[in-house]
Image (cartoon, rainbow, N blue to C red):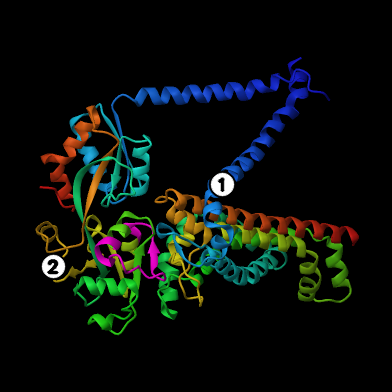
Amino acid sequence: MKIRKGWKWLILPIVAGLLVAALTLSGCSSGSLGTITENGSTTVQPLAEKLAGAFKANNPDVNVVIQGGGSAVGIKSVNDGTVDIGAFSRELTAADPNLVKHLLARDGIAVIVHASNPITNLTKEQVRDIYAGNITNWNQVGGQNRAIHVVAREEGSGTRTAFQDLVMGKNALIKSDAILQPSNGAIKTAVSSDSQAIGFISFGYIDSSVKALAINGAAATEENAKNGTYSLVRPLYFLTKRQPTGLVKDFIDFCTGTEGQKIVAEEGYISIE
Amino acid sequence: MSRYFIDRNAKYLVLVCASASFIILAAIAIFTLKEALPAFQQVGLTHLIFGTTWRPTMGGFGILPMIIGSLAVTLGAMILAIPLGIGCSVLLAEVAPHRVRQFLRPAVEILVGIPSVVYGLIGMLLIVPLVRQIGGTGYSIAAGALVLTAMILPTIISISEDSIRAVPRRYKEGALALGATHWQTIWHVLIPAARSGITAGVILGMGRAIGEAMAMIMVTGNAVQIPTSPLDPTRTLAGGIAVEINYASGLHENALFAIGVVLFMLILAINSMAILAIRRGKRAQDVC
């Protein structure tokens, strides 16, 4: 059979397409007035959600959309204009695009072990040697005669990059047979279920399921991080493409202001002075 | 009038539906290739596939450890799942009374519907500590293979069972009439006759195993290294993409798409093997 009236079977897809387009457009326009979008670092995400909640309580007609994705996603999306604010959990380098940074908080990185591990303190050098693979048994750092199970974050993670900068330095690499877990939560689960494990997570994720070690004698507390005795501390930034205006400026001012910084401290991050 | 209109044009409507799936496949293939191209150009195919160092933020783009990791967990799962799966399918098709089968078959089918993150979680909290008792950190090829076994068993069982049931009745009757026992009939007549279907089931299971990402991320430890023992941690191709795609940008992202291309090729090869196996089996049956 020939395709007579061939155009007729095109009607259905075209109508369907128009319908979808119309729905999408109407969906966008209805919410676009008063929406702030943010994505990026998963370390910042829980904090940003709390801040957004408090901001919305004061400004009920404003919608703040918070998403994760990781620091690399945050910097990329804000640079290409997909979101208003990108969350970033390490210091910017020369290789990163030129953006406006707003210091939101500081975050300590805690080195954690299983709650039953007798070790309570390590030096930064010991942590580096453990992660580089030079120390492989807990008895080399004063613990029991058991192998150390090293758990780290995956390549590209802001927390891993910060750990590399703060602990490993330029010349040491995290050993290649370390167990890698893709989030702070997954590291905590892995360490809390293995009595020989060591891992590192953001201060905001510490709870009673794991034990945070003191580094060079300074306990992993907000106070020590603030006064400089605890050295594994990194900045958390909100990035914007240009100097923010309007709603975005209001939100960032709220977050870096007194009220926002109170929430920062409540969530276990280190507030900026 | 309108009935004739529908009648005459229905085939074009289904043509549109059918071409949609082809267009989606082509779009995925083209997009993946396009995104992977810079990695192939800048890193080079040999460095990429035979390189052993994966440090994408420092210029190391070798995915050989991940290829080996994928093949190792899949092989491990196959070694466990093939005997278990064929055994279970023989039970369902030949041995079990109707009532047992009525209960067992849906149970096997439910296994397919469980999301892989649930398999991963059970693996992480149950199987990983179990493997740790034997040695190492527990996050290992062995743990990955065990979890995959549970995930692919239902595929192997249901396809094998169907193909054992599809063996013409006269084969079985003939064997029994010649004095063969039930067991001899199963082992020497039914299983060989159903070979092509069983092979197809095994290969489809293999395809599922090699593409699994979520559960593997949770139990294999994701360390990029060439493993020397089943207790060593490893990273699979699919797991490697899923772990890093959130953070990747630039050449790193292209390299992840290149992993996707390699995975695509592997799965294509496995599926072609399945089609060949089914076709060869059909021809063998036609001859009989």
The residue tagged with tag 1: helix, strand or loop? helix
Do marks 2 and 1 both belong to one polypeptide chain? no
Vertical side of A180 occupied by B24: above or below: above
Residue A174 inside the magenta-drawn segment: yes
Mark 2 Cα within 10 Å, few/some/many (few <14, many 20+)? some
Magenta part of the protein: which range?
A164-186
Q: Which amino acid does label 1 sit on?
A: Thr
Q: Which type of secondary structure does the marked residue at label 2 adopt? A: loop
Q: Position of residue A94 (x, y in %)?
A: 30, 49
Label 1 packing within 10 angstroms: few (<14), some (14-19), many (20+): some
Quadrant housing the C terminus of chain B: bottom right
Q: Residue B184 occupies which quadrant of the picture?
A: bottom right
Q: Is residue B111 visible?
A: yes
Nearer to us of marks 2 and 1 is: 1
Rendered view: A18 above or below A162: above
To which residue does mark 1 refer? Answer: B32
| B63 magenta-colored | no
**Dot 2 corresponds to which residue?**
A218
Image point (52%, 53%), residue name? B42
